[in-house]
């Protein structure tokens, strides 16, 4: 049974056209993370939510925003995608914040920017 | 800064042969270390983790890792690989200064018949 679900699995958007990626979880975890993973690179943390508290990484571009309307759902909004934003976007959850708790990853959304 | 390095970008191994993936860490104290696997088109899955205690850690899917402080290493091993082990493997360290995971660049494993 899927525990962290990401929709869509593949997303194609045009340069500059806003796009929203979705993540939902059935684990009732407090923390939700968004990572960006470019080809053959390590996942890079963009931001995370601990409950409703939003924590942005210092080097995450302003172009990237996130919303968490409730415990189960979290959205990644890219306001004006550039070609450099083409990547796999991974959502993850953990019971507690702080990194030591196991993170459960979704299958990812592969974003293509044309 | 606490970080991990995976020296091998790509490894090819025959099915049934043994596998060892290298991970070197940088940290003065006892690190918290993880190995994750990412199958094609999938998210990451935790294989095993080391926090303290026994330096040989058993994980899922028949994997184990050995923590060696003298070598600053946390290498992942499997005695006999299966075709389904073809994937990308990431070593990660928990950074105690900002409570985040820092991943290595990954090692891609190809399994040949």
Image: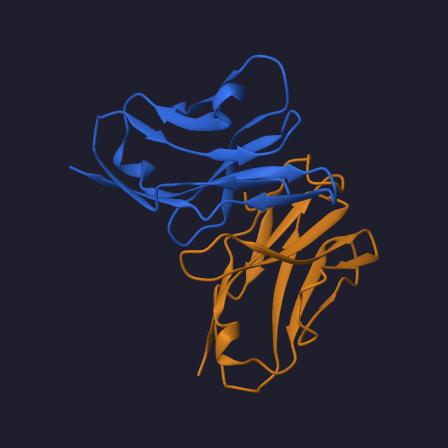
Chain colours: A orange, B blue
Quadrant, the C terminus of chain A: bottom left
- The residue nearer to you, when weighing B45 against B11, is B11
Left/right placement of residue B35 relative to residue A63 reads: left
Q: Name the spot of residue B44 as percent of width and height, x first.
A: 50, 45
Q: Give above or below for A96 relative to A23.
A: above
Residue A54 at what x, y percent from top left?
Answer: 80, 59
Residue B50: percent from left, percent from top: 58, 24
| Quadrant of the rendering where the N terminus of chain A is positioned | top right
Locate residue B30 relative to residue A54 in the image: left or right.
left
Residue at the farthest top position: B54
Quarter of the view holding residue A104: top right
Image position of A12 with respect to A59: above or below: below
Say which residue appears at 63% left-offset and 43% top-offset: B101
Going by the image, does B100 lie left or right of B78?
right
Q: Can you give x and y, in whole percent of width and height, for residue A86 in the image? A: 48, 72
Decide: is B23 above or below A15: above
């Amino acid at each position: 049974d899927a525990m962290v679900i990401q929709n869509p699995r593949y997303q194609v958007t045009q340069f500059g056209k806003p796009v929203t990626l979705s993540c939902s979880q059935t684990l009732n975890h407090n923390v939700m993370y968004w990572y960006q993973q470019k080809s053959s690179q390590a996942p890079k943390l963009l931001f995370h939510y601990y409950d409703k508290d939003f924590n942005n990484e210092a080097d995450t571009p302003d172009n990237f925003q996130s919303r968490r309307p409730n415990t189960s759902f979290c959205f990644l909004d890219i306001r004006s995608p550039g070609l450099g934003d083409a990547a796999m976007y991974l959502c993850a959850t953990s019971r507690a914040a702080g990194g030591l708790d196991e993170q459960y990853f979704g299958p990812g959304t592969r974003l293509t920017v044309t | 800064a606490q970080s991990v390095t995976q020296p091998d970008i790509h490894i090819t191994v025959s099915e049934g042969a043994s596998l060892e993936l290298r991970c070197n860490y940088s940290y003065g104290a006892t690190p918290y270390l993880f190995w994750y696997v990412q199958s094609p088109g999938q998210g990451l899955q935790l294989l095993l983790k080391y926090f303290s205690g026994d330096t040989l850690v058993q994980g899922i899917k028949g994997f184990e890792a050995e923590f060696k402080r003298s070598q600053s290493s946390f290498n992942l091993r499997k005695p006999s690989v299966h075709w389904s082990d073809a994937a990308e493997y990431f070593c990660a360290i928990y950074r105690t200064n900002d409570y985040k995971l820092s991943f290595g660049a990954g090692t891609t494993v190809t399994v040949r018949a």
